[in-house]
Image: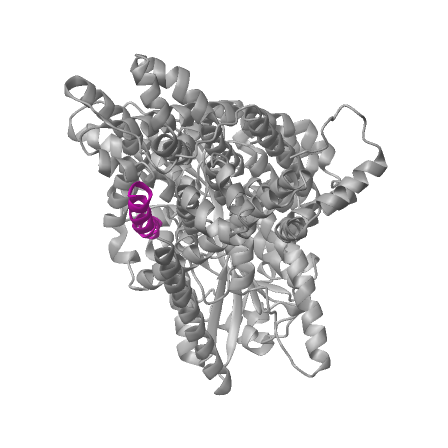
Amino acid sequence: MQQGGNNNEAFSLKTRIKRLKRDVNKWSVFTLAIVFFLALPIIFIGVELFSGPGETWGHIVEYLLPDYIWNSLYLVFICSILVLIFGVSSAWFVSRYDFLFRKQMEWLLILPLAIPSYIVGYAYAGIFDYGGSLDLLLRQLGLEFIRIDIMNRAGLAFVLSISLFPYVYVSARAFFLNQANNLLEASKMLGVGERKTFFKLMLPLARPAIVAGLVLVLMEVLNDYGAAKYYGVNTFTTGIFRSWFSLEEPQTAVYLSALLICFIFALILFEKWQVRKIKFTSSKTNSTQIQRNEAKGAVQWMIFLVVFLPILLGFILPVAQLIYWAVITASTVFDMEFVMISLQSFAIAIASAIITVLFALILIYFSKWSTLSTIKNISRIGVLGYAIPGAVIAIGIMIPTLALDKWLINMLGKFGIDTGLIINGTLLALLYAYAVRFLAVAYNPIDSTALKVDNSIPDSSKVLGVGNIRTFFKIDFPLIKTGVFSAVILVFIDVMKELPLTLILKPYHIDTLAVKAFEYASDEMVMEASIPSLFIIFTAMIPVIFLNKLLIKK
Amino acid sequence: MKKLLLAVATISLLVACGNDNKKNENSATKESSKDQVVNIYTHRHYEPDQDIFKMFEEKTGIKVKVINASADELIQKMKMEGKQSPADVLITVDAGRLSRAKGEGLLQSINSDILENTIPAHLQDVDNQWFGLTKRARIIAYAKDRVKPEDLSTYEDLVNEKWKGKILVRSSSNIYNQSLLASIIANNGEEAAQTWAEGIVANMARSPKGSDRDQVKAVVAGEGDLAIVNSYYIGKMLNSPDAEEVKTAQQIGLFFPNQGDRGTHINVSGAGVAKYAPNKENAIKFIEFLISQEAQQVFTEANYEYPVLESVEPVNDIKAWGDFKEDNLSLNKLGENNKKAVLIFDAAGWK
């Protein structure tokens, strides 16, 4: 929205300030306030940087850093390829074709997200283990067991991809379902074949949506700790934990986190750069949904297999392994307490999903309404939280909230009111932390749908004198509903399985399923962890199925 | 649609608040009836611990509230909470972390004749800031069909050429490995420790990965002949609900190294009273209870750990491994040398 007719003349400081004054409105101020609120933990981590790295920094650079960089790059590269293959192909087929069990597969494809990656990692290790499920199965069949070693870098890339590809699936499908129809019809009328239509038209057009999903996947890949540690792969995140806890140098850990954030920032810039010239909007987003082709015969089976493979690898196999473990450990582990904990986890996850999505909506729309062009970029700082390991975020949250708590205790103490910690160790701090951590998960799908809303409709509404907020509820919201619901599902699932942050910030009386699963898994009781893991999966399935219905029904 | 979303939001918030309120009421009523509590920060994620907490609640009427996380995170949390920390007791699964907590000024010295007199001197802090509760030995698990126990002798011998490509051990980010190397630093000096770590790396059957149980499985699968593991995992495998794991554990032998000299390296799971413990008396009572006959019995029976209380017999599976001589190195040394150990691991290329 850079104005001023001819941009050729150089800006003098004076005109810049003048422009700033002209363009600042209440929305810019609100946006800044909220960005500041959400970025506070990240800022505190950033401030730590000025105190310099710990004394072992040189040691880390010498012995460990090359390995961290190399392994992280490897994971980013391989996971990108695998995730794109799994995510885009399945999204295209379920949007474009009608085939056996399509409706069920539509939501089954989201479910791999419901299993924490480290649990998928354990499950696969269990399948390929000596004395594991595959071994037993082959022995039953009288076959020789060929041990496949999955616990290495390539295996880790596979495990992460298969459990994270739904991010790409969800955002690509939202695009195919709601944006693609007119173009498809035009393409068909011009006599262009299916394959060409997909590669030459749909894929380039869906790129922003696909890349938005991919960036989420890569942030999660870089952030993974549990699976990488178990598979013996040293990445930035395992390095952060090592320097913080084993070397007892939080400053060094912060330095590594900062490097990681630069890495992520480069990814975000890359995403922005790759969508820079693509601006296509459609005012008819809602009116027509994609028309499905009926697939028949061999084609139907081929499509079925392509779509079924990621479900099999990402959901059915790991869940089958978990169920097997659950059956053999049920007598020792199962407890009615799990039902109560499931309810708690569910409530917390839904509450934080809604809060986080609200923050994302506020950031996206306030910065839109603000005429200041740089605000949008500033608001993106808020999404960095996703790239930072949960444990580091937790510390970033504790610094300011504890300071506030101490101040409150002092103030109230003067009035003779004795309180304990008000924010820390309560749901407040936990919900705040989830919002900081998962803003990106909510922001990206909403932003990529919002990008496609033709501004002329809300603009004309405003010209007619309807305020921003009313316009939003009457016009924008119905148009971006799909994005908003996707965001709610994704944040919900992420919160359900979140671990390190929950461990540090959770109140005494609240337990989540992920915490329960971890308690077992961390002490090598992987089998016993299967029951809480299955509870996570089944609890997460409910909103996935429910909201998926909302997504496709108009 | 909006209504639906709204309805979902309201319901879930109600559930969340409902939960919260109920808990608040609970704690409120408890406080009014002057119910006692003790807040535990623990790294022990073992199911049997819950039973011990329940036993304590029944016996004393003091309510046990638990925060579970890794010791590192708990220490960080206590540091930041400072004087406001609700923690009364910190429990870790190794002495290194306890002595680190002590170094950070997070624990306090306590007077308890029971603790001081019952627990062997090398298993407790010199300043009475922490106390060992259970012992675990870092032993060598060997393939019965390929290795003669006579060929095994000490940790130091594992760097011998004859074990090239035969040794399985997990990552150096694991605290049990760090403590083992810290004990070697304390006993043999830094240079010897460096040579030892390099020697083990040279003899490794594969790049370190997985858990202690996975090392044992890899021995049986034939990937290597020896695994350096903690004793209680073998006990757990022998009693696993998975029949395959039981079979696996039965195929390996246990060897306690360094019986001819300083003894086998041991570590403890231990507890200390937090510096700013709001319920100090309860905290002491709680730790004293943990070394009582009944609690120690549960530790060894359900978790296959060696009790620190000499009058309690280890459970049968453990007893079958026989008595052994343990390294009487003061466990304070493990904490002191921990960082050095990590630096040596990195330099030696032990992942």
Res B265 visible: no
Quarter of the image that includes the N terminus of chain A: top right
Res A447 visible: yes
Residue B114 point in image, percent of width and height: 55, 74
Residue A326 point in image, percent of width and height: 27, 49
Residue B194 point in image, percent of width and height: 65, 32
Residue A530 part of the magenta-drawn span: yes
Q: Is residue A327 left or right of residue B83?
A: left
Q: Is residue A499 left or right of residue B125?
A: left
Q: Nearer the viewer, residue A68 or A550?
A: A550
Give the residue drawn at x 25%, y 28%.
A292
What colour scheme governs how the chains and residues are painted in the rendered image of this protein?
A: one colour
Quarter of the image that includes the C terminus of chain A: top left
Magenta part of the chain? A528-554
Residue A252 part of the magenta-drawn span: no
Q: Is residue A396 left or right of residue A71?
A: right
Residue A399 point in image, percent of width and height: 67, 56
Give the residue drawn at x 51%, y 31%.
A233
Q: Is residue B2 above or below residue A451?
A: below
